[in-house]
Amino acid sequence: MENQIRDFVEASNTLDTRLEQSTKEKVAECARLLALNLAHYKLKYGELPPTEQKNMAKTDQISSELADLLASGMLEMIAALNQVTIGNTDTTDPLH
């Protein structure tokens, strides 16, 4: 579990740095790109059950599964931000 927490913290710190370096317009473009990705996911796989969303948002303990999910979310945003700021479409290693 320590690895998952460490990965989440690293991704979160990297995202914070990238957000600080980005313009408001680029962050808005990133949000639109992520919204489009989410809409595509929902069309293909359906809605995430509201109880799962609520449980994830209200927990004060992070399981290794939740830590993986949080880190993946940070990496997705970093990849989207890379796309809109530097045109990098390689999402395999968004931290670099």
Image (spheres, helix red, strand yellow):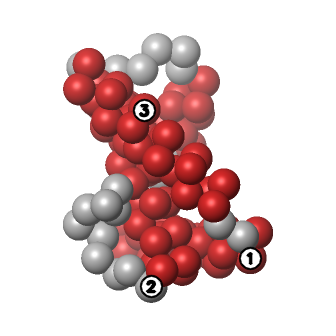
Q: Which residue is mark 2?
A: 87
- Badge 1 element: helix
Q: Which residue is mark 3?
A: 9
Q: Is residue 72 left or right of residue 33?
A: left
Tell me how far mark 1 sits from mark 3, CA to CA: 26 Å
Q: Which residue is mark 1?
A: 25
Q: Amino acid at mark 3?
A: Val
Q: Residue 81 in the image: x percent, y percent?
A: 52, 69
- Whether tag 2 and tag 3 are in contact, CB under 8 A, the answer is no
Q: Nearer the viewer, residue 52 or 90?
A: 90
In the picture as drawn, the residue positioned furthest to the right comes out as 24
Q: Residue 21 in the image: x percent, y percent?
A: 63, 61
Q: Nearer the viewer, residue 14 or 39?
A: 14
Tell me how far mark 2 sits from mark 1, CA to CA: 15 Å
In the picture as drawn, the residue positioned furthest to the bottom comes out as 87
- Which tag, 2 or 1, sits closer to the chain's start? 1
Category of crowding for the residue at label 3, using alpha-carbon neighbours closer than 10 angstroms: few (below 14), some (14–19), many (at least 20): some
Q: Amino acid at mark 1?
A: Glu
Tell me how far mark 2 sits from mark 3, CA to CA: 25 Å
Q: Is residue 28 left or right of residue 8?
A: right
Where's the N terminus, which quadrant?
A: top left
Q: Residue at x 46, y 72 (%)?
A: 82
Q: Residue 91 in the image: x percent, y percent?
A: 30, 70
- Which tag, 2 or 3, sits closer to the chain's start? 3
Category of crowding for the residue at label 1, using alpha-carbon neighbours closer than 10 angstroms: few (below 14), some (14–19), many (at least 20): few
Q: Quick check: can you spot residue 43? A: no
Q: Nearer the viewer, residue 4 or 40?
A: 4
Q: Residue at x 48, y 80 (%)?
A: 86
Q: Amino acid at mark 2?
A: Gly
Q: Quick check: can you spot residue 44? A: yes
- Whether tag 2 and tag 1 are in contact, CB under 8 A, the answer is no
Q: Residue 77 in the image: x percent, y percent?
A: 49, 60
